[in-house]
Structures are given as structure tokens and as C-alpha cells.
Image (cartoon, coloured by chain):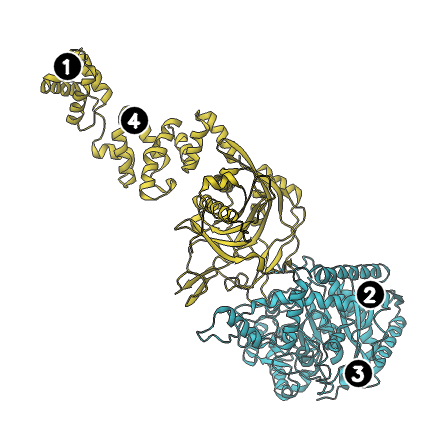
Amino acid sequence: MSSELTRMTAAGLSAALASREVSATEVTRAHLDRIAAVDDRVHAFLHVAADSALEQAAAIDERRTAGDDLGPLAGVPVAVKDVFATRGLPTTAGSRILEGWHPPYDATITQRLKQAGAIILGKTNMDEFAMGSSTENSAYGTSRNPWDLDKIPGGSSGGSSAAVAAYEAPLAIGTDTGGSIRQPAAVCGIVGTKPTYGGSSRYGVIAFASSLDTPGPFGRTVLDAALLHEAMSGHDPMDSTSIDAPVPPVVAAAREADVSGMRIGVVAELGGEGYQPGVLARFAESVELLESLGAKVTEVSCPHFRYALPAYYLIAPSECSSNLARFDAMRYGLRVGDDGTRDAEEVMALTREQGFGAEVKRRVILGTYALSSGYYDAYYGKAQQVRTLIIRDFDAAFGQVDVLVSPATPTTAFRIGERVDDPMAMYLADLATIPSDLAGNAAISVPCGLADEDGLPVGLQVMAPAMADDRLYRVAAAAEAAFTRRWGHPLLAEAKGL
Amino acid sequence: MTETLVPYAEATERYEPVIGLETHVELGTRTKMFCGCVTTFGAEPNSQTCPVCLGLPGSLPVVNRTAIEYTIRIGLALNCTIAEWCRFARKNYFYPDMPKNFQISQYDEPLCTDGYLDVEVNGKTVRVGIERVHLEEDTGKSLHVGGATGRIHGAEYSLVDYNRAGIPLVEIVTRPVTGTGADAPVAARLYVTELRDLLRSLGVSDVRMEEGSLRCDVNTSLAPPGAPWGTRTETKNVNSLRSVERAVEFEIERQAAVLDAQGRVKQETRHFHEDNGTTTSGRSKEEAQDYRYFPEPDLVPVAPPRDWVEQIRAALPEAPAKVRARLRTEWNVSAPEMEAIVNAGALDLVRQTVAAGASPADARKWWLGELSRHAHETGMELAALAITPAQVARVAALVSAGTLNDKLARQVIDAVLAGEGDPDEIVKARGLAVVSDEGALTAAVDEAIAANPDVAAKVRAGKIPAAGVLVGAVMKATRGQADAARVRELILQRLT
């Protein structure tokens, strides 16, 4: 029974819990058991909140017995990326500099999950301050890809994608700044969504790049991701960039799963050189599949996408250089060198020297430079202009089609250690995902098969205009249903790493 | 090191000063700029804080609408243009009292621009250009313990109170003020005074310099007449009106000495010392830090709707300068007399006293005379004295009615200030009323004439001034409670 529970979808668990076939406590215990059994190999979690999860589960069971009206996620476990503030649970953002910090408050999304009755299993591993594509930049070790434990699970939300792919949790939340949800989802063979920027609250999410960071859901199915998407989203007055509008009907769209008559654009610039042949083959098949389901496919050009990566690597580091200034040992977190002989400035410098990893320092230095007087216009200013051009490319494209599609990543999961000494190679992992972050619109990655060369999962990316997140689910769910019929089982059933 | 100085008169004979002022005003909003923490002054350190104003990881700012409204109010009162669209920007620098190590401020897109404030300086109107009015958040307050200077360097340890962190702060920057010559220091003081009165009338701040809710940085430069402007220094933390004047004065004297010696004035920040009125060199502007300003990505642009701006404009109170002009006519006082009232901080008090029934002349006389003297002796502000305008008006009424003479009235006022109660209670309790019983008075007069026959004879012989001795005798006999004028009348009736 226990292993069956961990194989169930969130939607399945939700139904079983509602009909009281299983209790939240049983479901939670099953997942805690699974974590205990596999996480020494996967290392998805930085902190397993077994006690508080079981307490939460018991409370949900009690409420259900009492006949309370509970939402669809009540009693369904969820893993939380360690970038979300969780009252009472350690929150490190994958950094040494926050080791041992227990936030005195909950992120809005943490709070919403708790209110929805979701069971918080623990905090998942990530690249330090969400900077990376592999979790290799975590100060607490690298997570493993359940398809092949020698491969990266993607990043920065790699702990969350690994946890879901390893059946340690049916759902997880992450954040996407340059692709940090879609890329790990793609390489782990699961579903991951970057909602519209402003569609999900950033309050309590430790900032990497404020104008890009977007919290979003992971699930093993499109419907599961939609259920979590709906529960975590919506206007938050605590986040000034939050959009005051109803959440797009993502769950309904995932259920409808109908693309007939939809206009789908293939982005000419996201493919070809730099993309793995197996990735391109699965992508081409996906496009044919969508066409066979009744969609009208055309090719569209977004000429400025080629400048997205360099623009991103000016904007994101610039914002992070300022966002990370607060980690100075004065009020919380690590403090180094406070031995009575050093002044505050020296303690700040020593703490930042020892508390931050190499990639974080690289980006802080890059951003500090890009914002400095005399260079601002050439770097940050110019990058913002490029951003505007990318937004215009999207606007023009969405004038012709309802959604855009591309491979989610140029390659499948690469070997741990393979790119750690080559930042540029690492940055290329986000080549296809960055444009949506810069434009602030919505995008999803859904599994579309295995690459012939390595037998590893490939993700299909679907992009939609801002606040049209429901279109993502409509397309992804249609593709998922057709693929599953073709394969005879969910893609993840072929994962053999564990 | 003692600076070489040139005597002020000489300095302003040889050089033209140009001044500029940056004034920081803490707004009197109930809550902070970007969070819901209250802003009460003097609370237990760090008791008015939350994840947002402490800059905890993950926290985000939300703009206080009232702070925007107050800033627009200030901008309109200063004849500024209100931006249709503007943004906040981050000013990045590391300091322990700044929770995020950046300050949310405004950079190249301030909320209000291009205004002016007219200031009366020695009978002349000086139009001070306002370059910009922008909104930002205040920092925490550091207390450096164990050092000689009270500064961070050399301190044994430092304590930080974040109650102030995040309080809305408005910065009002003037354009360079030229052509005031030797009046520059006075002009600087009067500008800040006028600004303070304006802000107070707008109800946007309690503008208490002693509590730091109004703080000034003063820029000064010198150049020979007709020459291009000189290099300016910025004197920080000038925290009283008098200090504003002294700081400019000192910088003029100091910079004149540098220029006289063919030296170069260094562009730098200087610290003002309240104790001796001097400034000393702070950090050099030439090696100033790069604040790496960029638009605050955690906030959306501020675009005040035009109809809202017009509503705010329509609700502006009468400007203090207009109020003064109107009152000058109503009270029939000269410009210098009005200036004296304003400088004494007595304008509102006089107004309230007149409103309570006193004549403008009486109200002015009491507040600028006896009460100012008392305030000066005790080192208090007039408004802080333990007497209300209504009580002053009552004393004036008792004098007009002849119940009190001036001497008795002063005793009553002293008693009110000593907390003995209302004027009427004091008059009753102390038995202070003027002796107006003609019978008793006549008896006292007769007694005095009988006791001083030589003096009486002189008066009879036509030496009227000699009557003063007899008046004094009667006043003494009645313990001052007689109406001296009436006594004199009675004496002269008897003897002439």
C-alpha cells in the first residue's frame, strides 16, 4: 500500500483522501518512508520536516473527520524549494551564509499551501540563491537525477524536480528566474510551470533577481501541476508586482486538454545549432503530434531571442548584486571573524568571502560592475533595451499564434561535474527558457519522450502570453494524453536510476 | 587643527557665496514607508520592526499611499510639477544601520520637480528654486559606544535601533541660491524656517529638528564677484535653525581663507559641530562611493492620477507667507514686528490668543515680552511653556478690566507657569486684585499725604513730579494692588 501511495498522482491522492480511502497521515508516512529509503541516493532534501508534516496530516485528518470542507490539496504532500521562507523550518537558499536561519515568518505561498491543507514534507536542495542549472552550486551537495544518479537533476530547483521524479513527493514548488523550473522538470521527465510573472507571489521568496523570479509548480502530470498552480497563485498585496486579477483557469484547461483549432507557433530561433539531435527529434515529433490533434502549426521568428542570454546575464546579476547585499552578518545567518579585533566592515567582508560560493560571487561581481557609474548605460541599460525588444518579439508572435513551442532545453541531463568548470556551458542550459523570463509571460515544460542517444527525458516547452497560463495546460495536457496513449504508460515509468 | 579664518565682513566683501540646501523631513505618517510598522518616536529600540523594515530575506516593500500623498502635498505647496509617472530606485551602499544595504530612494525620476519657495530676507524677497522633492526610506539609528568621537571608528561596539528604518523621508533639494551676498547665512536659516513652517502648516510632519524629523545638509561655495562658482562643500547634519546660519557663516570664513591663500577648496563632506560652530573635513567627495542606482524592481512605478493631484491641491491650506500677510493687516503690525513674532516661534500662539479674545497688541506683548523672557531663561520653546493661549488671553482681559495691573499680571503669569491653576483661581487664591474700592484708596492717599508733609508741600507749590514719592508710598501700603494711575489722580486732586 505504502509504495502504491507514493506512485499515485496528486489528483489521485486528492480523490482517495476526499473519499476517505486513505488518511493524510498514511499518505504523509508513505512519502516520509520513501524519502528515508531513497534520499541518501537522490539528496533531494536539505531538511525533512517529518514531525511537522505528521502534525499537519493529523490536523487535516481530524478536520476531515469533523466534516470540514477541505480543498483539493488537503492532505496531499508537497516539497518546498529551500528558497521559500518557512516559519519554524530552516531556510538556507542553498547557501552557507544562511546556515541555521529559521525565518520568523512564512512566504505567502508557504502560507497558502498550509491553508490549502497541503502537507509540507520538507525543504529541497537548490543551487545557491537559485544561481545554476544543476544544483552543483548548492553549499550542501548535489542532488541526483532519478533517471541516472550520475546525472544532474537540473537546477536551480533540482531538489524539487528530483523529489517529484523519485516519488518522494507528488508535488513540489520551485522558482524560475532563467529556467529554474522548466529545465529541471525537462531533464527529470516531469511537468514544471513558470507562471506569468506577478501571477504567483514572491513575498517570502529569497530574491535572486526580483524582476525575473517566479514561483511555480512541479508535478508528475499536467493536471497535478495545474492543481498546485491554482492553489499557490493569485494576487498578494504584500508583493507590489503581484497582478490583481483572477488566476487563469488552469485546472479546467488541463482537464479539457483540447488543442483543436489552436494556433501554435514554432520559434525558429529556438532549435538547430547547439541543440542535441535527440532533443530536436522528440520536439519535431511533438509538433507533428499537436498538428494531428487539430492544432494549426506555423513557424514564427523572434529575431531578438538570440540576445536573450547575454541580456539575462547582465540583468539577473545586476539585481542579485543588490539583493544579496543584505547578507552581511549583522542581523542573521553566518558571522565570520567577530573576535573583538575586527570592525563591522571586516566582519561583513570575511563573512561574505566565506559564506558565498564561487558562482554567487561571480554574479555579484558581474552585477556590481554592470551597474557601476560609467558602465550602467552600456550594460544594464542596454540589456533592458534588449528586454524590451524581446517583449516586442513575443507580442508580434502572439499576434499570430495562441502559443509558442520549442524544446525546453538544448540537451538532456548532463553528467555531474561535466560543466562545473565552464560557466558558459552551464549558462547555455537555459537558452530556450530565458526569453519567457525576460518577457514575464508564462511557460511550461512537459515530457515528450527520451532522446535516442542517451535514453534521457526531453521536455517540450509551451509559451503563452501573460495571464494566459491556461493555454499552457490545455496544450501540455493534450500532448501528455496523446503521448501516454502512444507509450502505453507515463514516461516516468521508464526511469531506472533507483 | 584650527582652521585659518577670514573675518566675516571681509570675506563677504571679497567673495560671493552660493548656497544650496538639502533638507530631509520625516513624514508624520502613522506607518512606515514600505510596511505596516508604526512610527511613534522614542519607543523601545527595535520594538517597531517587522520582516520588511528589517530587510529579512524574502521580504518585499509595498508603498505607503499616504506618504505619496504627503509628498505631493509638499511638492504642490512648493510650486513643483508633480510627475505623471515616476519610479523608486535603489541606492546601494553598505552600512550596518541599513537593513538591506541599499536604500529605496528616487534617483532620476523624482515625484516632484521644478518649484520655488519665496523667503523674506531683510525686507527683500529671495526666490529659492526647488530642484526636486523626492521620497525615500530612513535608515536605522546607530549608537557607537566606547569611542572618543561617537563615530563608528574607534568605538568598542555599536548598537543599532531599526525603529527608524523605513520611516518615510522626503528630501527637498534647492537649486543654487545666488546673489544674497553677506545675507547668505541668514537666507539659509530663513529658508529652512519658512520651509519648516510650511511643512507644519501642511500637517505632513512634526518638523522637530531636535528629534531629527527635520535635518539639513548645507552646501556652500565662494567665488570672487563675477567669477564662475567655486567648489562647494557639503556640511552634513546641521540640526538647528541657528546652526544652519552658523555653518554657512563658518564655511564662508574658512573658504575665504583658503582662496585668499591661493588654495583650492576641496569638494568634500564636512561635519558641523554644534558646540563651537565649526566644520571639519569628512569624507572626500572625489573618492565618493558609487551608489549604483537602478530602478527598484520590487516596486511598480508610481503614477498619481491627475484628478487626485488636483484634489490634493484644492485641499492645501493657506501658505504661511499668505497667512502672515493677512495677519499683518488684521493686526496692524509692521513687517519687522511680524518677523519678530515669527522668529520667536509665537505666530500660532499669538493667533490663538487673539482667537481667545485678546487684542493683537496684548497678545503680542505678552508672548514676546514676559513669556519669551521666561522661555529664554528656562531654555524652553515658547510653545512648550505651561501656559495656554486662552490663559494669556484671560490675563490680558483682567488687565483691560482693571482687575490687574501689569505688575500683578506678571505675578499671575508666573503662578500659572508654576502650575498654580487658571488666572482667575490664582487671583482669588492670592488675593491679587487691584484695590478699586475708592474709600480704601482715598484713606491710603490721605495717610500718605499726612506722613510726607514736605513732599506734599512741594507738590502744592507746583512740583508735580514729586507726587511720584506719594504714589510709591500708597502702592507700598496697598502691597502693589492699587491702580497707580488712579492713585496719582487722587493725590493730585487733593493737592492742586
Q: Are marks 4 and 3 on the same chain?
A: no
**Amino acid marked by disc 1:** Lys
Q: Amino acid at mark 4?
A: Val
Question: How far separated are the C-alphas under marks 1 and 3?
Answer: 134 Å
Would you name the residue on which mark 3 appears? A489
Q: Are marks 4 and 1 in contact (CB under 8 Å)?
A: no
The amino acid sitting under disc 2 is Val
Mark 2, other Cα within 10 Å: few <14 / some 14–19 / many ≥20:
many
Q: Position of residue B299 (x, y in %)?
A: 64, 57
Taking the spot 44% from the left edge, 33% from the top edge, the residue there is: B339
Determine if residue A46 is in view: yes
Q: Quadrant of residue A305?
A: bottom right
* Chain that is cyan in the image: A
The residue indicated by pointer 4 is B399
At label 3, the amino acid type is His
Determine the secondary structure under disc 1.
Answer: helix
Q: For the residues marked 3 and 2, what is the alpha-carbon distance in whole angstroms?
A: 27 Å
* Residue A403: mark in rendering: 2
Cα–Cα span, label 4 and label 1:
33 Å
Contact check, label 2 and label 1, Cβ < 8 Å? no
Q: Residues within 10 Å of mark 1 (few under 14, many from 20)?
A: some
Crowd rating for badge 4 (residues with CA inside 10 Å; few <14, some 14–19, many 20+): some
Task: State how far apart marks 4 and 3 are (Cα).
Answer: 104 Å
Instruction: Tell which chain the image draws in yellow.
Output: B
Task: Report helix, strand or loop for mark 2.
Answer: strand
Q: Give me the chain letter of mark 3.
A: A
Query: Quarter-wise, where is residue A315 in the image?
Result: bottom right
**Which residue is label 1 attached to?**
B458
**Are labels 1 and 3 on one chain?**
no
Q: Are marks 3 and 2 on the same chain?
A: yes
